[in-house]
Amino acid sequence: MKHWSKEESLSRKGMKKLQGERLAKVCERAYASVPFYKKVFDKAKIRPAQIKSIDDIVRLPFTTKLDLRDNYPFGMFAVPMKDIVRIHASSGTTGQPTAVGYTRYDLEIWAEAMARTMTAAGTTANDIVQNAYGYGLFTGGLGAHYGAEKIGAAVIPISGGNTQKQIMLMKDFGTTVLCSTPSFCLYIYDVMKQEKINPQSLKLKIGIFGAEPWTDAMRKEIEKRMHIKAIDIFGLSEITGPGVSFECAEAQNGLHVNEDFFYPEIIDPDTAEVLPFGEEGELVLTTLLKEGIPLIRYRVKDITSLNPEKCICGRTLVRMSRVRGRSDDMLIIRGVNVFPSQVESVLLKSKAVAPHYMIFVDRKGRMDEMAVHVEVTTAFIKSFTQKVLSDDLTNFIGEFEEMKKLKKEIKERIKDVIGVTTDIKLVPPNTIARSEGKAKRVTDNRPR
Ligand code: DLL
């Protein structure tokens, strides 16, 4: 039987009522059990009893990553440690990690959120799910694991990395669903190609991808190369992990938010004013049921918009648009705002380049300079030279007229679409570092 909860197709009115009831309770709990929330509620002169409907949420103060850091490791927990059954942590690449604790009930809700996610992607109890998200402090591995188990699929808990083995198991076990970052899937594809394994010879049909920004152009590349349906899923460890929102296979058009668990708002990142449906801004999420670490109006920093229209799949859950990137990943190049995903969209319009690129930002004197390194495809090189593709190519790759023309085209397109002048460097196939987890596509060397 298909896993489908009635909350996925509630009327807007019914959903708002449910959200309002849950918000009132979470405010009570947070106020009573977390000193941080008592302090900020008191400061804002608001009592939990004043929160009666979901529309009252605008009266509540925001929570930020800094608040989590200030209360590191367990200061934001709302239950005693005897009730916590799992602890995860963010990677902390930009400083101290943040720790999140789950009660048994929180894990149930998370598994339910991921069961909906897997189902919407087309996964059923008949599937064999190869889970290549990292197991460990990162929430991807265990998050996808319990969701897949909940719907009765067979999980292969291989975790990230180990590309050769990933391919071996796909073949031997007849994997039908792959869970990984989109960049890791591309890496798996590269290795399959080197080993002359045709993706069509595999049973793989669905890819459940997330944990990093990726564009629709990248989706098309993956779908074409791997012969699968590529589904976008979103989440973050502070809120639960993967399972905050998910695309459905029917529409692949926006990510349904599990809004009975996580209430989404969009705000103007500068003024913090709440924006109407359809407008792009910073995502803010409130956990409506979390016991371990309830978060009220948590500023997520990801840039997206919300669409309340009913989807062709039958779900009424509000949809968020594909995340464009984080506001703190946005590069400001000579005053122009640039998201790496915009660069990706432009690059992938060209058939001559592969979906592997790096962006380098530097400052020369007072000027910001942006360089984009992108791999050309083997097919493109073969179209104008019969020279063997070897490392030697690195030395003279820039000398071919075809290369110069392509470089110029990409440079002009980036200038037209994004409005910045970039230095384009075309590099031979397989020379840009591949990722087995979240891809790192930007190196910003500007002094801070
Ligand atoms: O990345 C949870 C996750 C695991 C999501 C597996 C999806 C699949 P964190 O490590 O806490 O958690 O990182 C969260 O990653 O705020 C976004 O900036 C980014 N992110 C996650 N999913 C997407 C996505 C996991 N589909 C941060 N598109 C988030 C764009 C994403 N960015």
Image (cartoon, helix red, strand yellow):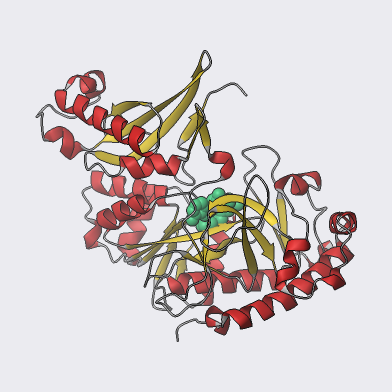
In this view, 360 is above or below 353: above
Give the side of residue 267 with respect to residue 191, left or right.
right
Residue 15: horizontal and vertical position, in percent?
62, 79
Give the side of residue 286 with respect to residue 366, left or right.
right
In this view, 410 is above or below 298: above
- Which of these two is toward me, 25 or 56? 56
Q: Of all residues shown, which one is farthest toward the top?
A: 365
Residue 199: horizontal and vertical position, in percent?
25, 57
Residue appearing at x 78%, y 49% in the figure: 73
Q: Quadrant of residue 56?
A: bottom right
Residue 291: horizontal and vertical position, in percent?
76, 68
Give the side of residue 33 with respect to residue 285, left or right.
right
Visible residue check, residue 91:
yes
Residue 35: horizontal and vertical position, in percent?
88, 56
Visible residue check, residue 431:
no
- All told, the count of numbered labels is 0
In this view, 166 is above or below 352: below
Residue appearing at x 19%, y 37% in the figure: 378
Which image quadrant: the C terminus? top right
Q: Quadrant of residue 391?
A: top left
- Which of these two is toward me, 95 or 258? 258
- Which of these two is toward me, 100 or 272? 272
Residue appearing at x 26%, y 22% in the figure: 394
Residue appearing at x 41%, y 30% in the figure: 420
